[in-house]
Amino acid sequence: MKSARLYISLKPDILDPQGKTVHHALETLGFDAVASCRVGKYIELAFPDLPTEEITRRVGEMCERLLVNPVMETWRVEVVEE
Amino acid sequence: MKSARLYISLKPDILDPQGKTVHHALETLGFDAVASCRVGKYIELAFPDLPTEEITRRVGEMCERLLVNPVMETWRVEVVEE
């Protein structure tokens, strides 16, 4: 079994109110070294043993067709053996 | 500047309705090779140039105090140079 780890984050120029809220909460707790905080999504997809390139290709297609909003979000994927 | 990438996922034995919904949507689109799908959170925290071990330690403390629900979630962190 292989696992595709997909990380989706907002583009840098898109406002992130959820990230701002978390950042503020961290500061309130005394964590004042944090310069910025952005919140995104993390999706783990389990695949049977296909070649890594094939999994990467399919996940790319899933991102285009369903998982990612290309106007606001960017993504990256890594495939790991489980 | 360094960036701490924090990945938060549900523990394997916790039900994930959001993941199930995404999985079903992917199947509907014809992506039937996916064995399972779990949805988690991805948080990027920017730090000034502290040592990597110090950033890892602080992020661990943030997870304990705010970011992670230890009953339902697990987390891992990686620190990268930006």
Image (tube, coloured by chain):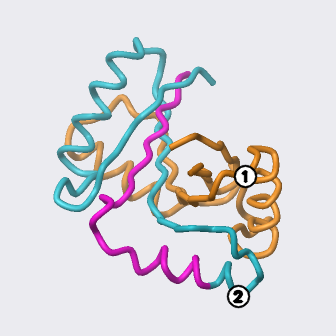
Chain colours: A orange, B cyan
Q: Are marks 2 and 1 on the same chain?
A: no
Q: Position of residue A44 (x, y in %)?
A: 53, 57
Binning the other alpha carbons within 10 Å of mark 2 as few (below 14), some (14 to 19) or many (20 upward) gives few
Q: Quadrant of residue B75?
A: top left
Residue type highlighted by circle 1: Leu
| Viewer-side residue, A10 vs A77 | A77
For the point 49% across and 63% down, which residue is it? A17
User: Is residue B10 shown left or right of residue B61?
Assistant: right
User: Dividing the image into 4 quarters, which one contains the C terminus of chain B?
Assistant: top right
The question of residue B19 being in magenta is answered with yes
Q: Which residues are magenta?
A: B1-24
In the image, is residue A28 above or below residue B20?
above
Q: Chain of mark 1?
A: A
Question: Is B37 situated above or below A59?
Answer: below
The number of discs equals 2
Residue designated by label 1: A50
Which residue is drawn at the image coordinates 38% and 74% (left, top)? Answer: B16
Query: Which one is nearer the viewer's eye here, A35 or B37?
Result: B37
- Would you say A5 lies left or right of B76 here? right
Residue beneath disc 2? B28
Name the side, left or right, on which A5 lies relative to B51. right
Q: Secondary structure at mark 1?
A: loop
Name the front one of labels 2 and 1: 1
Q: Secondary structure at mark 2?
A: helix
At 64% across and 57% down in the image, what residue appears? A10
Tell me which residue sits at (62%, 58%) in the image: A47
**Does the magenta-highlighted stretch encompass residue B71?**
no
| x and y, in percent, of residue A22 in the image | 37, 54
| Residue B34 percent location from the top left of the image | 63, 68
- Kindly check if marks 2 and 1 are in contact, taking CB atoms under 8 A apart as contact: no
The residue sitting at the bottom extreme is: B28
